[in-house]
Image: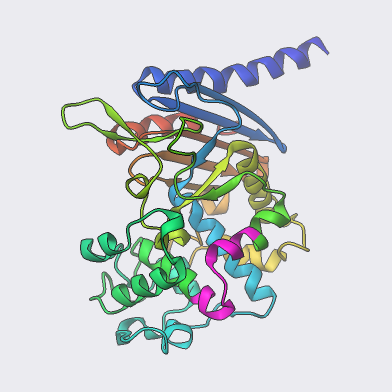
Amino acid sequence: MIALAAALLLQAAEPAADAQRLVDQGSPGAVVMVLDQGDPVISVAGVRAEGSDAEIELNDLWHLGSNTKAMTAVLVARLVEQGVVEWDDTVAEWLGDRVETIRPDYADATFADLLHHRSGIIANPGPITALQLMGSDDSRDVMADRLVYAAAVLDHDPGAAPGEFLYSNAGYTVAGTMLEAATGESWETLLQREVFTPLGIEHAGFGPPGSTAAVDQPRGHRGGMFGGLNAVPPGARADNPPAMGPAGRVHMSMQDYALWLDAVMAGARGEGDPDFLSPESWQILLTPPEGGNYAMGWGVTDEGAVLRHAGSNTMWFVQAVLWPEADRAAVAGVNEGRLDRVAPRVGEVVLGYAPE
């Protein structure tokens, strides 16, 4: 019993030390989570906003950035199993009568192509489209905006040949727009009902967390013109346009992110809840195309033994690494987005929890 207690104390101490180290290296706030056999150990350090004395708390919400992509892929899988859409449904089938022009390069791109980043669609829309769609979540008609976004990227020159890998936020946004066309409901509504609720995720949302009235949640940070960091309060400047939700706008508590990661790892082992997704769907989601190493929302290494992804809206950075067979995952994140500095530091932290 004493040995077990000592091991648990050590397990908690390591994430605490790593979170503090990320703050000591210059980030305002940090979180580190180790999920082992379904039990999360979460540690936080630092402050919610530079210049504030509001400390990061265990239940705080973290902007996940492109870690959202795997959730969008699972949403597609859920709707495939319900017969609403099919993996080989094409852009032209769902958006052909909703946008003015679809270049021939993209007309036959399927859900699978989009989620594997193999459609050839550019990574992001041009700045004019992005500026046109900027705004807070409650100030935009997000479904109308997604059609505008999709129309812009589907009428743009390809970023790569169809079938070639090109990481594309735009591709995931188009996939979300196709789901909206198929269901008549927003991606946000669908994700809440089909993914969050079945998994018991209760503390999740979209866009920057918190309010402008108080520093009640962590805020993202940009590098200042003369050095240092500037906190960005919730609002239009604090995130990508709401239209880009399917590519990277979910925020969530670490306790709830643990529920998500636990479901992914169980699915990878073929042990997931069949009422949520079948083993066949998990295999589709987590298997890269031949010759590739990117599945649907996850980088895959060591023949599927490791799943990994990172996310950033340029004001936050969160990375997750999963070792499904060992039933272990590690997550680290900071509320700033100077990627040249924080990405290697966060990566070092999460890889330090690899099972022996």
Examine the structure image and report whether residue 339 is included in the region drawn in magenta. no
Q: Is residue 245 above or below residue 108?
A: above
In x, y percent, where is residue 274? 77, 63
Q: Is residue 74 visible?
A: no
Q: Is residue 349 above or below residue 128?
A: above
Visual colour scheme: rainbow
Residue placed furthest toward the right: 1
Q: Is residue 184 above or below residue 212?
A: below
233 or 42: which is nearer to us?
233
In x, y percent, where is residue 249? 46, 52
Residue placed furthest toward the top: 2
User: What secondary structure do most residues of the magenta stretch adopt?
Assistant: helix
Q: Quadrant for the N terminus, please.
A: top right
Q: Which residues are magenta?
A: 178-192
Residue placed furthest toward the left: 226
Determine the residue positioned at 73% across, 62% down.
Answer: 276
Q: Give the image quarter of residue 353.
A: top right
Left or right of 303: which side holds 22?
left
Determine the residue positioned at 47% across, 39% down.
Answer: 211
Left or right of 206: which side holds 336?
left
Left or right of 53: which side holds 260?
right
Residue placed furthest toward the front: 213
Q: Give the image quarter of residue 242.
A: bottom left
Determine the residue positioned at 67% across, 46% down.
Answer: 202
Q: Quadrant for the C terminus, please.
A: top right
In x, y percent, where is residue 98? 41, 85
What is the tally of numbered marks visible in this picture? 0
Q: Is residue 269 visible?
A: yes
In x, y percent, where is residue 136? 40, 53
Q: Is residue 350 above or below residue 13?
A: below
Examine the structure image and report whether residue 182 is included in the region drawn in magenta. yes
257 or 225: which is nearer to us?
225
